[in-house]
Amino acid sequence: MTSRGDRTVPQASIERLPGYLQVLSDLAARGVTGTSSAELAGLAGVGPAQLRKDLSHLGSHGTRGVGYDVVHLRERVRAALGVAQELSVAIVGVGNLGHALANYSGFTARGFTVAALFDSSPEMIGTVVAGVVVEDSARLADELAGRGVAIVVIAVPGERAQAVCDAVVAAGVREVLNFAPRVLQVPPGVELRSVDLGSELQILAFHSRNRP
Amino acid sequence: MTSRGDRTVPQASIERLPGYLQVLSDLAARGVTGTSSAELAGLAGVGPAQLRKDLSHLGSHGTRGVGYDVVHLRERVRAALGVAQELSVAIVGVGNLGHALANYSGFTARGFTVAALFDSSPEMIGTVVAGVVVEDSARLADELAGRGVAIVVIAVPGERAQAVCDAVVAAGVREVLNFAPRVLQVPPGVELRSVDLGSELQILAFHSRNRP
DNA sequence: ACCTGTGAATCGATTCACAGCC
DNA sequence: GGCTGTGAATCGATTCACAGGT
């Protein structure tokens, strides 16, 4: 569920890069220095040809007849994903889910900084969550620009999601990750991804029902 | 990130059905009785032709020259997704995220019952979360079968995810939703979907970096 | 001898455009 | 006249298979 963005690297490849980065980091942590498309593909759960084709979009970083250098390749994938420089993220909605997301460790571990939290309920505003003071959602526009936020995560109830999304886009943010169970509309040029627990379960339910 | 399942309805279509169900429920709630592929497509953020093709996989449920009956179509999509009968879900890992998931309202609202919670930390076991007693993860195998769990949600730290997944699959569960930041391996015939916050952010970071 | 990088072939999914029906 | 349902055409992504380099 993605609005069109650039090209040169196909969208389908981009979506697999984080998985490759993960297994590369894992190999590096275990002290493995060299690997092959077959090994990487096995760990990432894809075919070797697909992995090579995906990596070829980032340039030629292996050695024919030998394989890939784990650390070098990891840096290339990291750079391609834009995770080399730190990016600031804001979370709107500090309920159950927003709270959990703010405290999510793998978050900072992967180069993202929680730069701002927003909520609209008076008893939430001003409290400190994950070391950040919760701001009033009404002040979204002012704060986002000031803190250099590149990505906004929406974790508000469905009814408010579109309004929050509109405000965020109006404030100039062009990358939005939505956890509210709604289909959101964004203008062209804004990249929207949606994660909905209910949808995921329904997709699994479909397969559960249609068994051979 | 899906292992191959059945056919007749293409995977890509299946993944859009929850979105259609959502906008249909929304229309129904607003008292709208009839609609068209153009309207539905607009609300769901896809093209009209794509929507008609997707729905055609479920059979012919519109009226030529007129459009679709909202309530009838909603029931057809619900039935196709297998959400007509209630399904039981278990959540393994009651940390920040597991906690939030257990309390997620849209959960029961969409025909899923939280039938069991598991955790391995002694101070968590025995506590009540979202009205359910947290069991010891060691007793996974016994409890899953007994409670008729169809879908398991994994919300444990990355290091433990594969072990939990193996245990769950060994217990006969064939639908797994993974929130841990790891690529998991499952045997053929098991449907695995993975949602990773870090990966989603990295994909957005890619687009952020590669702007025209 | 071996493994990468990649054009060519295949496969599947999206879009077009119109026949069929109300 | 208008909108669905669908074959045909297009587009993109995956897989094959081998040439290129170590």
Image: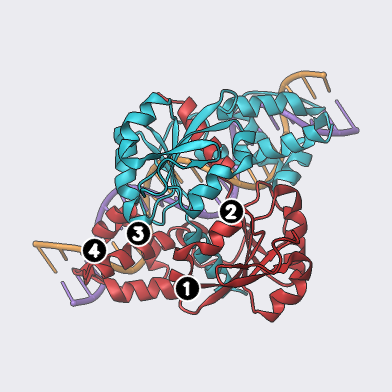
Chain colours: A red, B cyan, C orange, D purple
Report which residue position mark 1 lands on: A111
User: Looking at the picture, do discs 2 and 4 lie on one chain?
Assistant: yes
Secondary structure beneath dot 1 equals loop
Report which residue position mark 3 lands on: A51
Q: Residue at x 78, y 32 (%)?
A: B28
Chain ID at mark 1: A
Which label lies toward us, 1 or 2?
2
Is C22 left or right of B78, judged from the image as shown? Answer: right
Residue B175 appears in the figure: yes
Report which residue position mark 4 lands on: A36
Secondary structure beneath dot 2 equals helix
**Residue B116 position by quadrant:** top left
Is B152 left or right of B17, judged from the image as shown? Answer: left
Q: Is residue B177 above or below residue A76?
A: above
Q: What kind of residue is marked 4? A: Ser
Q: What kind of residue is marked 3? A: Leu
User: Looking at the picture, do discs 2 and 3 lie on one chain?
Assistant: yes
Which label lies toward us, 2 or 3?
2
**Residue A4 position by quadrant:** bottom right
Considering only order in the chain, which callout, 3 or 4, is on the residue closer to the N terminus?
Answer: 4
State the image coordinates of residue A204 (x, y, percent, origin top left).
Answer: 49, 36
Chain ID at mark 4: A
Chain ID at mark 2: A
In the rendered image, which quarter contains the C terminus of chain B? bottom right
Q: Marks 1/2: CA distance?
A: 21 Å
Residue A97's disc number: 2
